[in-house]
Amino acid sequence: MFTGIIEEVGEVVQLASSTASAVLRVRAGAVGQDVTHGASIAVNGVCLTVIGQHPVPGPDQAADSTLLELDFDVMAETLQRSVIGDLSAGSRVNLERAARLDSRLDGHIVQGHVDGTAVVLARTPGEAWETFRFSIPDGLARYVAEKGSIAVDGVSLTVAAVGVASEGGDWFEVGLIPETLRATALIDRAIGDHVNLEVDVLAKYIERLLTYGRPPTTNGGN
């Protein structure tokens, strides 16, 4: 489990893809220092398992103790449901280690299980923040509520507004303060870019509890 409070921005070293899976290597600083084999790390909001660690040579070819390169297996389902497969060497990614039970929950409950991807529709600068508008994939709009929580590329954000575009398609907006832009890779996102979305897990469970056992609705049904 994660909180959506990004610890640092890492850099993709490589993404080695095969037919149905991939191995992602990411260079990290503080996030890699106490990580063990098998640990969970959220990479742009996707919960991935560490399968290898490699020292990074410094300018004098000695290992740089402040950096590590971490390897992650990425299965086909993750590649299909998220934008991990679009990463390349040099891409900046949001990193967060798994939450500790003895720490404050400063964001919201984030599982690292991406529900789908969205597109950046607009970026509007403000006096003290910047408003981002994102599309909402089909089937996810019912989980997105004004003043509710959502994770965008792993960043815990509060939904400022929701709506439907005149030409069709649901959207939501969030406001990013300067600190969020500075501390995350969302500052790199341009109009047309894709991002990972994870809706509030509590909304999904509530829907499941309310609809379990009911027959599916049909056209004309109540």
Image (tube, helix red, strand yellow):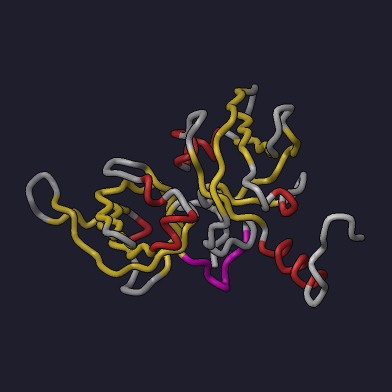
Q: Residue at x 47, y 42 (%)?
A: 184
Relative to 61, 124 lies left or right:
right
Q: Which quarter shows the C terminus?
A: bottom right
In the rendering, at what x and y percent does residue 95 appear?
A: 43, 54
64 inside magenta stretch: no
- Measuring from the top left, give residue 178's x and y in whole percent: 55, 33
Q: Main secondary structure of the magenta part?
A: loop
Name the residue nearer the viewer: 178 or 170.
170
Q: Residue at x 73, y 61 (%)?
A: 203
Q: Does residue 102 belong to the magenta stretch? A: yes
User: What stretch of residues is rendered in magenta?
Assistant: 98-105
The vertical placement of 34 against 135, above or below, is: below
Seen in the image, is 191 located left or right of residue 58? right
Which residue is at a point 37% across and 50% down the rendered structure image? 85
- Return the x and y of residue 7 as percentages of the image width and height: 46, 53
Indicate whether 34 appears above or below 192: below
The quadrant of the picture occupied by the N terminus is bottom right
Q: Residue at x 66, y 63 (%)?
A: 201
Residue 95 vertical placement versus 174 (above, below): below
